[in-house]
Image (cartoon, coloured by chain):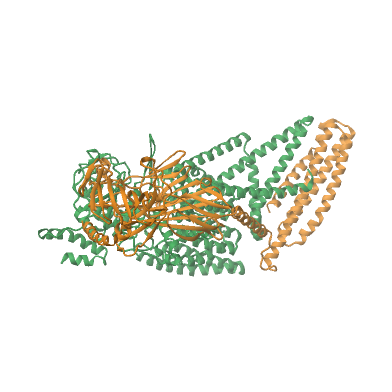
Amino acid sequence: MNRVRSDLLLLFVVGFCMFFSHAFSDLVISRLDRRIDLSSQVVRTVVSLKVENNGPDSVSEILLPFPEHVAKDLAFLEAFVSEGKGKTKGSSDSLPIKVVNPEGMPSALSWYSVSLPKELGKGGNLNLEVKAVYSHILRPFPEKITQADIQLVAFQDGAHYLSPYAVKVQSLTVKLPEPKVESYTKLGNTKFSGSEIKYGPYENLPPFSYSPIVVHYVSNKPFAVARNLVREIEISHWGNVQITENYDLVHAGAEIKGEFSRLDYQTRPHVRGASAFRNLLAKLPARAHSIYYRDEIGNISTSNVYSDSAKTLLEIEPRYPMFGGWRTAFTIGYGLPLQDFLFQSEGKRFLNISFGCPMSDVVVENLTVKIVLPEGSNDISVSVPFPVKQSQETKFSHLDMVGRPVTVLEKINAVPEHNQYFQVYYRFSNISLLTEPLMLIFGFFLFFVACVIYTHADLTISKSSASYLAKLQWDEVQSTIQQFQSIMNRSLIVHDKLEASLRDLSRTGDVQTCKAARKAADTLLKELSKEVKPLLSFLQSSSQAAQILPKVEELVTKERELQEKLMLKHSTVVDAYEKKSSGGRDIENRVASVQQKITLLRQEVDDLLEIIDEI
Amino acid sequence: MSEPETSQSTALRHAFGNVLSFFILLLIGVLAFSIRLFSVIKYESVIHEFDPYFNYRVTQFLIKNGVYDFWNWFDDRTWYPLGRVIGGTVYPGLTLTAGALWRIFHSLNIPLSVETVCVFTAPIFSAFASWAAYLLTKEVKGTGAGLTAAVLLSMVPSYISRSVAGSYDNEAVAIFALIFTFYLYIKTLNTGSLFYATLNAIAYFYMVCSWGGYTFIINLIPMHVLLCIVTGRYSPRLYIAYAPLVVLGTLLASLVPVVGFNAVMTSEHFASFLVFIIIHVVALVYYIKGILTPQMFKVAVTLVVSVGLIVCCAALAVLIALVASSPTKGWSGRSLSLLDPTYASKYIPIIASVSEHQPPTWPSYFMDINVLAFLVPAGIIACFMPLSDASTFAVLYIVTSVYFSGVMVRLMLVLAPAACIMSGIALSEAFDVFTRSIKFQLLGATQSPQVNKAGDTNSVAKNDVVKTEISEDSLKERPSRKNKKKEKENIEKASSVSRIEKASLVSRIEKRLLVLPLEASVVAILLLVLLGAFYVVHCVWAAAEAYSAPSIVLTTRSNNGLHVFDDFREAYAWLSHNTEVDDKVASWWDYGYQTTAMANRTVIVDNNTWNNTHIATVGTAMSSPEKAAWEIFNSLDVKYVLVVFGGFVGYPSDDINKFLWMVRIGGGVFPHIKEPDYLRDGQYRIDSQATPTMLNSLMYKLSYYRFVETDGRGFDRVRNTEIGKKHFKLTHFEEVFTTHHWMVRLYKLKPPRNRIRGKTKKSKSVSGSIINQLCHAVHVYYCETCSVTLT
């Protein structure tokens, strides 16, 4: 209970400063209702005040002081003018708030000033609503509990609203998560009913009146605190916004001591593990796709996605139940359709996307939002509805040449209230989209050109070396042999034609055409043999061809022989037909011996061709 | 048909054949890569098993700190308090390869994570391995066989088992290096080019960097060289293929820190040096034979042989004496267990305790190489007709690898490429024979009616068409064959040309004789296709079902879909986030690599089983009663103890099932742990019949602590019995975490009690002996403890 003592000290300080408070006494708060919501780890207070100006001068701003130990946990502060009463409060836009240091005030207080939309004249009044959210103000007490214990939390504040102005009537309502309270400070006019504690109404309090209260109550709500959260929002103009969030999470409630027994936890999870939390719920935008949930050692399989047209709910479960003081780290990522978040105005594009963590009930101590714009974006400006630290860096990703501009926004103590839309304006020309595909195409083109050049280039270093010359010669020999082979094949085809003409003859009996065919074949063969001569002489002169030459020569002689035999056969058959003697069988008999030789020769020629071929 | 067109179309077909085989190879690469992605699709992109986690961690270190820090890395997070010199004890090939890949991607600004690169290294290299197999088989038997072998290798289950996406292990890269080294050796042998010989040495260097299996290369190649010399196939090409490899290769190999002087000091390498000497002698003999007359030569031979024999005998005697004087005879334990399969189980329980060091069973052959097992003999026969230098190498490779695979399951991996090459040759030869005989039959069928139906007008036109087609076909066959030989012949010298020519002539004549009936060959082709189809189905099944489980995530199918057991990572994540950075975690060595990589905590022992005593210490602690165990662990500065327990969900490979190995290994060093104490009548049991030593051992207690409260009677679903000792309390340990399915249980050592006067004497006498032994085991570190306790 050291803290309570320090608060008493503070009380003296506050009492001390009451002497200086006359400067503000022109304003009077005629009515003040304060509601403190303790139902989660984030403490939300809503103060509705009715301000009256009793002084002669018109007032344009109202001061809100916060004790320093509270101010350091103040995560979010918002004030707006409320019109009307009850539930039809049409709250206008939030009013601008700035930090001020009024002179003569002790440093134990932090001051904020709210600028009013219009000056408050003499006798005028105004309904104001101030919403403040604190992140780490709840203290688990005791600080260490066993698995079976329930978690108790202490909360301290003043029963009276700390105000530099006199307050006529004020009241305070504290809302608890469960109707179980260990102890609470009892002052006059204190009521405890259900899960609410009511203080007040108190009347006619002077400025800076302070009376501390402590509420010690049961809270088994998850105390999920992200020590660090890095959100990376990467825009691709091909149609995707990719969001990656790296969490470094801790259960900031009462730490577990002693054993953790899985058995107890499994048999009675709500009793032996009441303070632990099992899962977290992230509310992602509608049409989120490709959602993943993993940590540095791989995918975490315990997650579920529920989606409808308005939102996508991602329920994730850490690898192990989170007891007090236990930590974990994980990454979630998802893609969003570009057209839902990227718009154009006045030639500029702007991204409109929410700032904070998508999980309800998670407090982020250090939130870093990185917006990665496509390569070639320029003229970047950011508009965020609350103050953030801003810087620029460059990121290199797929095939970047100059890097993508990254805007880094940093925020300390982010609460769900910070989950507001912010805008990033930039210019980007569509032509830049094509650079990377073109680069790829060009790269591959160059590669193929290089391949073509390599295959056609002669990279020999020494053009006069023996092996190189031999290779050149050998290439020549090969090409000659190839030519030679094609000639041989052609002459074989001519042979086939001759045979075919003979068959025609046997069918039609047309001797003249057959003769003509022979004549044509004869001339063709002669031409071919002429063609062979230079090739042969080349081969004879070339030293490289020494091993093939005998085969080639053999082939030539064999082919010639075959040619002769064929001619012989042809002429005999034709003669026989001319004489019209003795029919088919006789002819066959006569030709038979020749035919035998022909088939034999043909076979040999074929073999030789194949051998040469294999060389 | 006009004449110039034919030559043009030959060239065109020639080019077409090249393009076609290029695209086939490309598709083979894609197939090899994508068949290994089942694990990513079915599970996730994650590192598998145990060793890959270590490699992954080393890669992370390499990428973060650079190569020089990597060489000098002394890892103080394992083998506490000894530490381990990672840079000098690891084969760096895989790590450097992945690191280089990562560098390349990042220099192109492609932001892949280290994990992604590591996960996909193995599939990428299996594509490379398929291409290497193509090249090797092409050198042996031509393009057709090469393509077939590449297809087979791209999906052989044995290799898939070690190279699925995420299986980031040395073998993934090493198999590629192995095949590629063999290819370059054969290429050098066929061409006699020094360029390829140099490349060969570099490929060998890469293999040495990657895997301890490089000794297979450095023994197989000398064997082949020796075989060639003995069978009279010595040629200058053989000399060029071998001599530079030994000289350059040994120099390069000794650059790798983990090999170092082993490259010249251990017996595994002696074969290569011996053959190196022999080949020089043979070369000299051939040279002398060339310059001397035959009579002079004979005289010289008798002179040299008689002198040489004496010298050789003397040298051999010295060598044998030297080798015999060393206790392991100069061979490392793992290599010895290759030569003598019973060696490991006799002397090194650590080697024997690893399941992949056991001899394989017959079904595992069928599982791992499937139909290839039947095709291999056919391939060997095909290699003998005609027998060339390259095909003798292929035969030698298959024969030796079959032997080695019979010794150790793990070496099935070396057999797989050989089996693929052989089967590729067999299949391609078979298809060759069948298609040729079909072609022959068709040719014969069209020619015979031609004679008979000479008078028929209709048939002639048709015949012509058929005939031209056939001639086209025969033309088509020619260029392909020519193509295959062309490059080779370009550089080769006269002698080889004439020999191959002769050989091909012989084979062609044989071919002409080997013509099968049409129906038989059609049926045979269909059957072969069916066999191939079976193989493909089996491979896809093996890749999808058998080998793609990452083993850190388990799944079961139940009525309401897939159930995931992610307990290991749950425990490791808990350790990494909720304990101090310097806390030491004790567990059985299996989980050491994963703990250091995933939980980033210091471990006492890990999967690199370099220090038997240290492992025995942990084994002793696990098999001791709680108090003694606490003292051992406390002396090792251990804060957490991790046990794996499968009894709750029925996960069979848990610590209770491995417990006997802990006892054995522990008892091997600390004789007060006796195996019979843990066995009831020679049977290992944990029920009420179990021995009290067993029931009081730390492992039993940590596994079954409060287990009885889950179902009231403590029914172990792995052992299918009720446990023996049900209700007990832990006095020196406290449970700090148990995972969702109880598969991993973490205990914390309780802080030492305040000293109570009366009890100190008793504990001293019990623990004194143990600690005394520890001091002898790990000399330096415990002497202080020792003196404190004993005085």
Image quarter of residue B667: bottom left
Where residue B726 appears, as percent x and y from the top left, is: 20, 43
Q: Is residue B572 visible?
A: no
The residue positioned farthest toward the left in the image shown: B758
Q: Quadrant of the C terminus of chain A?
A: bottom right
- Number of numbered discs visible in the structure rendering: 0
Task: Tell me the colour chain B is drawn in.
Answer: green
Q: Quadrant of the N terminus of chain A?
A: bottom left
Where residue A398 appears, as percent x and y from the top left, is: 53, 55
Q: Left or right: where does residue A487 sit relative to residue B601?
A: right
Q: Nearer the viewer, residue A192 or B665?
A: A192
Q: Is residue B414 visible?
A: yes
Image quarter of residue B366: top left
Q: Left or right: where does residue A351 sit relative to residue B617?
A: right
Where residue A452 appears, as percent x and y from the top left, is: 67, 57
Residue at 58%, 35% in the rendered image: B523
Q: Nearer the viewer, residue B152 or B441?
A: B152
Q: Is B5 above or below relative to A514? A: below
Q: Is B523 above or below relative to A254? A: above
Where residue A225 appears, as percent x and y from the top left, is: 34, 52
Chain letter, colour orange: A
Q: Nearer the viewer, residue A472 or A6?
A: A6
